[in-house]
Amino acid sequence: MTKMKTAEKQETTKKQEETPAEEWQPRIVAFLCNWCSYAGADLAGVSRIQYPPNVRVIRVPCSGRINPLFILSALRQGIDGVLVSGCHPGDCHYISGNLVARRKFALLKNWLEYVGIEAERVQFSWVSAAEGGRFAQILQKVIESVKRVGPIQKLTKKL
Amino acid sequence: MPEIMIAKTVDKKKFADLAKAIVSRGYRLYGPVRNGGEVTLGEVGEEPEFDFDYRNFKMSPKEFFLPQSEVLCRFCRGELAEDAAPAPQKRVLLGLRPCDARAIWLLDKVFLEEPEDFYYKQKRENTVVISVACANPATTCFCTSVGGGPAAAEGSDILLFDLGEAFLLEAVSERGEEFLNQFSKMTKDATKKQVAQKKKIAEEAASRMEKLPLDGVAERLAKAFDSDLWEAPSQKCLGCGICTYFCPTCYCFDVTDETLRENGRRVRTWDSCMYSPFTLHASGHNPRPSQKERVRQRFMHKFSYAVDNSGQLFCVGCGRCIVNCPVNIDLREVIAP
Amino acid sequence: MSENVKMSDDLKAVAKKLFEEKKIDLLIGYEKGTLPLRTTPCFVTSAGDCDRLVWDGFCSNNLAVYLPRLFSREGRPKDWRPPRVAVVAKGCDGRSLVGLVKEKQAPRDNLIIVGVPCRGVVDLKKVQAALDGKEPAGGEIAEDGTLTVHVDGGKDIRLGRDEVIFDSCKGCPHPDAPVCDIRVGQELAEKQAEADFGDIADFEAKSSQERWDAFVAEISKCIRCYACRQACPNCYCTTCFAEQTQPRWIGVGKDLTEVMIYHLGRIFHQAGRCVDCGACVRACPMDIDLRLFTRKILKDVKELFGYEAGVSLEEPPPLCTFKMEDDQSFITEP
């Protein structure tokens, strides 16, 4: 999983290096649960709903699969913002995966903010398979909020 | 024992001037820096004050020769980068205790003998070690039991003694003599009386230390591999690694590659035999599966295998492992019987 | 002083009886250490050995940390049976033991918890600060908790209880082990005040940059010796994420980013499990104020899920369960 992300990020790095004069674009990774949020994102695509290309999607079976280390690892590799999206509570394909995850996410978000990581960098949402438009709106909001806080400086690994 | 070559004195009031002169000659000067209740070896400020009234530095000075994290080389897209590990600016380490200096002398046997370690060597060659002889050993010190002493010269280039009104600086190596000669205008020759005074300080300090029964410990340990003396300390041992990180002679390291997209670097970092993954094989087998094997290994390496390899005990009696162990495992208790 | 001696004697008597009645194979307690003002963990296997045991305000180590490895089946022959172990437990240690039993790291039936009354444990770093460079030669704790330190070549120093005990002991809400098989000495007064998270709230009120700077300042001291992890009874993973190589989450070494992620990850793994025993802070050789961070997790677990670790054997751990009405104010809406 981590290798996939790295390969994808190499492409974006090249692009950034080739167009230094343009406005900085944030790099955002979105972990989407297969049954709801990923399908919702797919619906946005099929419906030709436009949203900025700053996001790379990683599909997971359920939002409950998210290991907090995925998020920390993304920040460490220089990703400016992370979105995790799952089914609405009560609609989880695995019944309660997102419900247990909800507790984990609440704690994690507070935890990272507590030590000084900007709140905008790690966000969580519920998007269903029918909500293509809503997915695009949430993404738009996330991208704009990450743009406001600028490129990530904290927790990035420098060689 | 290296011969004492020349002995000079400097008035305490003039010592700060000498320090400034050292810096103006292009040396980076590291000396005792107080931080709350602790003393560490750090870069001295613009207006240095020298107070050698401490037992020892919190951390050993091995960081100056074997840094905890050291970049060995860098690479990008398969090509090695030039000069990833430049030699440090020449520097003076002032304020080490003779036990820590002896530790450097022992590390030389590991890193400067065949095969030579390039990274260690370039740091070693650019360093002048000025040790400060001990007048007040701690109750956890036992350098005289492991071949050292409060005024031992191994590992040092210059030995400094506090004579009250003045410091006595004794060159105990060629590098030390060369160094002192650069500042001959700022120092006076030591008188016979002063030399006698410093001898007395050293003897008194040595007499205050408890002598542990360590004669022939290497042979005795070699027979104790299967003994049950390892049970008690290993039951308590948390495997935390503090002893190895604070020990001035522990030198085990790990080499890893770190990559981020197309860039990478090879890093050498301290590792500890007290951790389980230290001997974990790729197959999953671990020849030291429990804390018992690891605790035994540490003591036997220091007190038995090291003697086989280099002829010297690899403990200098600084006492840091005793003071810092969270569960009070006491080397003196384990080894003495 | 006399009370301490009586307590130690009572403890020895309890221990001897357990061995004589063949109820245990091993008792983990404390004995006098080799350094002044120190005790050290002690593993007793027979009635005759019980005289080594002591109980006083120097008994700082959390002994629960030894249980996972004692009961682990890894590498044991098929016919191995877990030992029957008694553990001398202060309040905090007792809560760690409850946690370990819940997480199936120690079978309740093989465990005898010997509760001892704790008035707080002496923080040697504070004593050292008061001694200002001089060395202690020994010391005693009076009944009211005052510590008298005999100084090597100097006068005695007297330190009041509140000056000298660990921060985690001040205002401790559970001085007695909540689940206990045998109690030595009388149970202390009712549960003390609730844990006070006022300092955490103060920290939360600071700006994001201030908090980051404070985090950097503390974590920069870290030498990544893993003492905090090894001293923590809850950190019993065979392979810690910080040392995992498949995948490699963080590199080895002292890079600040890696060290930060190690602490962020380790402390987050304690969510719903940490009992604030303070073992991590005590083990840390670099005086990092870990509790400034661990207690944030404790505060959130209390406020968001109404859960306190280590008090009940029946209550499910908060991250293994959920309520439909759990807070979701943090969710991003369009």
Image (spheres, rainbow, N blue to C red):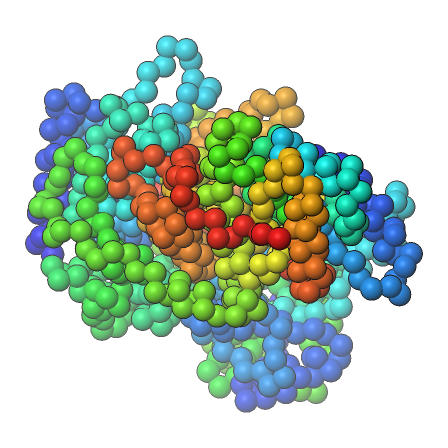
Q: Left or right: where does residue A14 sit relative to residue B295?
A: right
Percent of width and height locating residue C272: 39, 43
**Residue at the top extreme, as displayed:** C79
Q: Residue at x 58, y 22 (%)?
A: B285
Q: Does C198 sit left or right of A158 as displayed?
A: left
Q: Position of residue B92 (x, y in %)?
A: 67, 70
Task: Tell me how many marks there are.
Answer: 0
Q: Is residue B28 visible?
A: yes
Horizontal relation, residue A149 to residue C113: left or right: right
Query: In which quarter of the view is residue C274 placed?
Result: top left
Q: Residue visible at 61% across and 48% down? A: A72
B276 lies above or below B59: above
Q: Residue at x 70, y 69 (%)?
A: B91
Of the 4 image quadrants, the one containing the N terminus of chain C is bottom left
Could you say which is closer to the camera, residue A22 or residue C149? A22
Residue at 48%, 53% in the rendered image = C329
Q: Is residue A75 visible?
A: no
Which quadrant of the structure image shows residue B84? Answer: bottom right
Which of these two is toward me, B324 or B191? B324
Residue nearest the viewer, comparing B208 with C167: C167
Q: Nearer the viewer, residue C258 or A64?
A: A64
Tell me residue A37's x, y (percent): 64, 38
Q: Position of residue B124 (x, y in %)?
A: 71, 59
